[in-house]
């Protein structure tokens, strides 16, 4: 219980800057939870995709069952499975779909990156406001109100600390999700290249046989 009281006192000492910092923290948390769900639901890669049992014996029979329709592999698989479309058109549509998948999986990361920069700046603003409050209490003859001066310094330190904590958490989250997006696109590229190679080989074999 004492820990909660100390936390409430720290927030109270932080002044009005704590409110926008709290808003940034809530937004960052919402983005992190949303991206965690998106990667778990729509970008989790099944194991051993490179094996024939995972791809299917023919170029058209692809993806392990059970994936949602909006899964990244499902979205690309629907394009590859279209035997009526010329191969050059399939490749163009795959490229456009891959770009859309990258945008979808990166949604909100720009805001997370902005929070990394904005949170310390807001904390610095709280520092400046707190120090200005302390300096106003210093008169020409010395300290007029030592308690008020120490309170202003505490406000400055609390605002800076909260801003740095929010920025650090957002920075780690941004780097993690950015890496996940890059790894996802690498896996999709490898998968599509292998499937396109199978389709080209099958087309060549059919041409030689005919």
Image: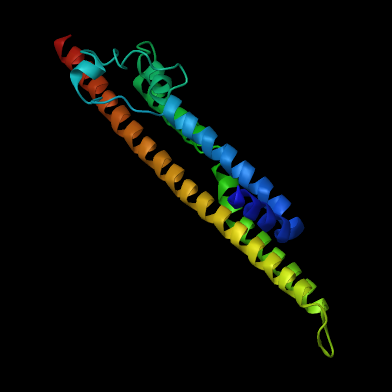
In which quadrant of the rendered view does residue 55 lie?
A: top left
In which quadrant of the rendered view does residue 181 lie?
A: top left
Where is 132 relative to 51, above or below?
below
- Front-most of 152 and 38? 152
Q: Which residue is at 51% across, 55% downward?
A: 168
The quarter of the picture where the C terminus appears is: top left
Where is 80 relative to 144, above or below?
above
Q: Which residue is at 72% across, 51% downward?
A: 19
Q: Is residue 102 left or right of residue 186?
A: right
- Front-most of 73 and 48? 48
- Front-most of 100 and 35? 35
Where is 68 relative to 110, above or below?
above
Q: How far across and how far down the image is residue 207, in percent?
A: 20, 14
Q: Which residue is at 75% across, 59% downward?
A: 15
Where is 142 relative to 69, above or below?
below
Indicate the colouring scheme.
Answer: rainbow
Observer able to see residue 173: yes
Q: Which residue is at 76% across, 73% downward?
A: 147
In which quadrant of the rendered view does residue 95 lie?
A: top left
Observer able to see residue 92: no
Q: How many marks?
A: 0
């Amino acid at each position: 219980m004492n820990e909660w009281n100390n936390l409430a006192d720290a927030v109270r000492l932080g002044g009005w800057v704590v409110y926008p910092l709290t808003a940034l923290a809530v937004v960052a948390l919402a983005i992190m939870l949303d991206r965690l769900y998106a990667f778990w639901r729509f970008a989790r890669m099944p194991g051993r995709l490179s094996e024939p049992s995972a791809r299917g014996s023919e170029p058209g029979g692809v993806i392990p069952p059970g994936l949602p329709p909006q899964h990244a592999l499902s979205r690309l698989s629907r394009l590859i499975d279209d035997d009526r479309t010329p191969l050059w058109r399939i490749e163009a549509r795959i490229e456009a779909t891959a770009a859309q998948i990258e945008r979808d999986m990166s949604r909100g990361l720009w805001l997370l990156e902005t929070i990394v920069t904005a949170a310390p700046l807001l904390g610095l603003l709280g520092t400046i406001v707190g120090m200005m409050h302390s300096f106003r209490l210093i008169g020409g003859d010395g300290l007029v109100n030592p308690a008020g001066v120490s309170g202003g310094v505490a406000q400055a330190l609390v605002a800076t600390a909260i801003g740095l904590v929010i920025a650090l958490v957002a920075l780690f989250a941004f780097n993690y999700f950015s890496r996940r997006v890059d790894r996802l696109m690498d896996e999709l590229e490898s998968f599509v290249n292998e499937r396109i190679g199978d389709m080209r080989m099958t087309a060549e074999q059919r041409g030689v046989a005919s």
